[in-house]
Each structure stands twice: as C-alpha cells, then as structure tokens.
C-alpha cells in the first residue's frame, strides 16, 4: 500500500509541475516527450519505495544530479551493447570512458551512503533496502566464523550491485510500459471512458464505506478493468523484445512431423514481441 501511495503522490507532483509550467508559458506552445517525463516519475517512485530517498525529479521537471549520472550510465550501457567492439577500448582514457567512470563512482558512492545511513538506524524499515539489510545481517551471522575483511567488502559491493540492478532493470522498463499504456488509451476513447468510470465508481464506493475523514486511495485490486488494460499494454509492448538463453538440457519444440529436439548448449532467443502477437493465442 505504501508504494501505491508513493506512486500516486509522485504522479500528482508531476502533474502539478506541468500545470505550473503551462501557466507560466503565457499561452506559448509547449511540447513535452511523455517517455522522458515518465522516466523522471519512475525514478522518483523507485527512490522512495526502494530506499526512501526523494530525488524530486517530477517536482522540478529535471534530473537530480545523481539520477542524471545514472541515466548517463544507462545510455552508455546501451551504446556499448549496440557496438560490442567498444568493449575492447573501455580502459582507454577517452571522454566517454572518463565520464562513465566518474558517473559510476558518483552513483555507487551515493548508494553506499544511503546503505550506511540506514544501517545506523535502530529500525531498518520494511522497504526494499530494509529487507536487503536484514538479509545481509543474516548472511553475516550465518558465515561469521569464515568471514574476513575481503568477504565483508564483497558483501557491501554486492549490496550496491543489487540496488543498481533494481534501478537498471525496473526504472526504465516501468516508464516504457506506462508510456505504451497511455499511447493505447489515447488511441481508444472507449477504453479511456471505461477506465474513468471504473476509477470513479471504485472511489465513490470506497468513500461511502469509509469512516468520516478517511480519504485513503482506492484499492488497486478493485480496479479490475484498469489492471486488464495495463496487462494488455504489456502484452502488446513488452518492455524487452525478448531474451536469450543457453539450454542446459534437451528441449522438444513443435508437434508431429514438425517436432524437433534442440540439443544441450543451443543458443536460443525467445521473441516476446512475436509470441505476444501470435494470432493462434491472441485473437485480434
């Protein structure tokens, strides 16, 4: 429920900031890129829900310095992935490599500071970072007799890596998913109307059952149609087009005369985009 409240409050901050910018434009035309705005929003949500840090990207309509460095790291990673040959030159003192090393140092130092600050508190909290810290303490306790200084440093580095992985894997893909959902809602006025009707009905029903003064948000589980719209958007526009795997055991594919066995160590690609749009499973 906390993450639900955080998400809504961050979205309201973004809307308020946009409204303020529109009003200050004095009637001039304003164009904004939805995906970029939602990247600001999802970074705020992950920061607050994951480790209770307010980047205030949405409120300011610009990146927090640490978040900006993180975005640079993400963009640089994509650039390197699209040009594998650059992997041979990561150690050279080029501008890109120097900027990437500086960004990596700044982001990791920021995360290490948050971890250290939370670790010093009496209550670790129930968010992602709090659970991660408890897991760290359990690991240290279970292997205390075998740990040395190098092992301790390794655990701390792993903590930072896990948080970075959460941001890399979750923040951008969530922004992309919301962007495509809004795109399809804008293309389908009937769907937009049904979403508004369900939200209004659930909110009204909940308010009638609440005690006076209780203004809690609608239960997401009650928004059945809204959930279906998001799920359908994810089917049509998966955040990842597919993934690759190397088989660890033989796998049979196809049926009848078209059946074929893929041997161990086969390099396979699962094309989500095509699978999710296969008319044999999903009628138009």
Image (tube, rainbow, N blue to C red):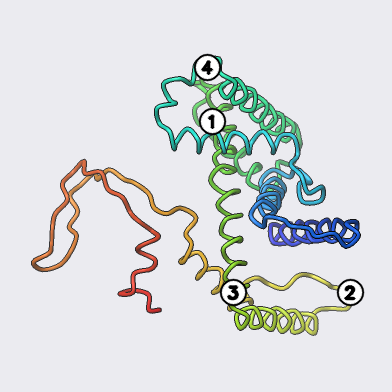
**Residue drawn at (40%, 60%) of the image:** 273
Please identify, in this view, whether the residue under mark 4 or under mark 3 is nearer the observer. 3
How many other residues sit within 10 Å of disc 3, few (<14), some (14-19) or many (≥20)?
A: few
Q: Residues under labels 4 and 1: Cα distance?
A: 12 Å
Q: Secondary structure at mark 1?
A: helix
Q: What residue would you read off at disc 4?
A: 150
Sequence order check: which comes first, mark 3 or mark 1? 1
Sequence order check: which comes first, mark 3 or mark 2? 3
Q: Residues under labels 4 and 3: Cα distance?
A: 56 Å
Sequence order check: which comes first, mark 4 or mark 3? 4
Sequence order check: which comes first, mark 4 or mark 1? 4
Q: What residue would you read off at disc 1?
A: 158
User: How many labels were placed on the picture?
Assistant: 4
Picture quadrant where residue 256 is located? bottom left
Q: Residue 267, how many percent across, how many down?
A: 25, 43
Q: What residue would you read off at disc 3?
A: 187
How many other residues sit within 10 Å of disc 4, few (<14), some (14-19) or many (≥20)?
A: few
Res 213 label? 2
Q: Residues under labels 2 and 4: Cα distance?
A: 54 Å
């Amino acid at each position: 429920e906390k993450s639900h409240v955080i998400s809504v409050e961050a979205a309201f901050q973004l809307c308020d900031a946009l409204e303020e910018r529109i009003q200050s434009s004095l009637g001039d035309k304003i164009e904004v890129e939805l995906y970029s705005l939602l990247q600001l929003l999802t970074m705020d949500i992950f920061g607050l829900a994951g480790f209770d840090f307010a980047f205030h990207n949405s409120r300011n309509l610009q990146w927090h310095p640490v978040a900006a460095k993180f975005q640079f790291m993400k963009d640089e990673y994509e650039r390197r992935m699209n040009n594998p040959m650059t992997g041979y030159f990561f150690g050279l003192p080029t501008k890109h490599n120097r900027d990437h090393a500086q960004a990596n140092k700044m982001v990791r130092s920021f995360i290490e500071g948050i971890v250290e600050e939370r670790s010093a508190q009496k209550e670790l909290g129930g968010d992602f970072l709090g659970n991660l810290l408890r897991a760290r303490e359990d690991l240290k306790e279970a292997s205390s007799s075998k740990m040395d200084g190098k092992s301790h440093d390794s655990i701390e580095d792993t903590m930072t890596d896990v948080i970075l992985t959460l941001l890399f894997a979750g923040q951008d893909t969530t922004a992309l998913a919301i962007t495509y959902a809004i795109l399809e809602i804008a293309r389908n006025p009937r769907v937009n109307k049904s979403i508004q009707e369900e939200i209004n009905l659930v909110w009204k029903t909940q308010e009638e059952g609440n005690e006076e003064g209780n203004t809690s948000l609608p239960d997401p589980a009650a928004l059945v149609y809204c959930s279906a719209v998001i799920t359908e958007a994810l089917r049509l526009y998966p955040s990842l087009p597919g993934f690759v795997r190397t088989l660890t055991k033989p796998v049979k594919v196809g049926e009848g005369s078209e059946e074929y066995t893929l041997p161990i160590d086969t390099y396979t690609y699962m094309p989500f985009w095509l699978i999710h749009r296969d008319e044999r499973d999903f009628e138009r």
